[in-house]
Amino acid sequence: MRVYLFAESPEALTQLGTSSQQVRQVLARIFPAATTPALVVAAYFPNDTVWCGQVCGGPRMPATFQQHREDHWAIVERWRAPQGLPESYTLIRLLVGADITYPCTDTDHYGWTWTFPSALAHLAVVASHERYHLTHRGQPADVLADERTANHWALHGAWNRGYRVQATLPADAMPRPARPSGSLRNWRPAGVTRMAERAAAAHRSRRRR
């Protein structure tokens, strides 16, 4: 596995209360060498309060490192593609904004309200969610149920690593059997591409990104 870190400012990781070494250690535990051959994990820390994750469709080539299909991933264009990428690889993107203040409470795209005690805990949950999709690839019969399963996986994984993340599930989020997930869906907070929802959330004094 290769890990690339992209911080928008030299103080980004310090501002988040962590370091590049700690970030790499967390990712090495979540994505062990045997996870998949030629895995590239790109972790982004922009000056923003955005957070999300994605297993990209693949395999990728060096020339397609920055390609994206969703507007909120245009953020990857702020950095150049790294040198020395494998000729063919699987790409996972993780993003945690450096302007997030912890503890952080936010609601994701599937109605789960999370409380992250630290940036490393936040990163661990996002990375674990995407690892589930990486290791359970395919086309699910029920996308929502599959995403809920990934959330359960991520929550349990965070607790197993000592991160006391809290999650409040929506009323209809009881776990159900699900087939493996596809490789192009994104996990992100609710309203990340919905300006009207952002405005409504601000009116309710509920922080969303």
Image (cartoon, grey):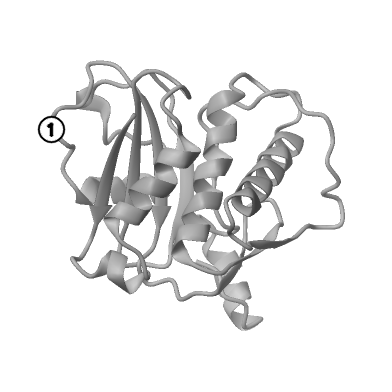
Q: How many marks?
A: 1
Residue marked by disc 1: 83
Q: Is residue 166 left or right of residue 121?
A: right
Q: Is residue 36 above or below residue 186?
A: above
Residue at horizontal 42%, vertical 67%? 49
Tag 1: residue type?
Answer: Gln
* Residue 71 visible to an observer of this rendering: no
Task: Give the percent coordinates (x, y) of residue 157.
Answer: 62, 45
In the rendered image, the residue lying farthest to the left is 83
Residue 72 visible, this orientation: yes
- Please name the residue shown 59% across and 57% down the image: 162
Q: Residue at x 38, y 47 (%)?
A: 25
Label 1, secondary structure: give it.
loop
Residue 65 image-quadrant placement = top left
> Closer to the camera, 129 or 205?
129
Q: Nearer the viewer, residue 158 or 56?
A: 158
Quarter of the image with the N terminus in it:
top left
In the image, taking residue 109 as reference, residue 173 lies left or right, namely: right
Q: Position of residue 14 (x, y in %)?
A: 29, 70
Circle 1 Cα neighbour tier, 10 Å, few/some/many (<14 / 14–19 / ≥20): few
With respect to residue 209, does 153 lie above or below?
above
Above or below, 3 against 182 in this view is below
Residue 155, position in %: x, y?
Answer: 66, 50
Percent coordinates x, y for residue 164 in the rendering: 63, 63
Residue at point 65%, 53% (across, down): 159
In the image shown, does 119 or 145 lie closer to the viewer? Answer: 119
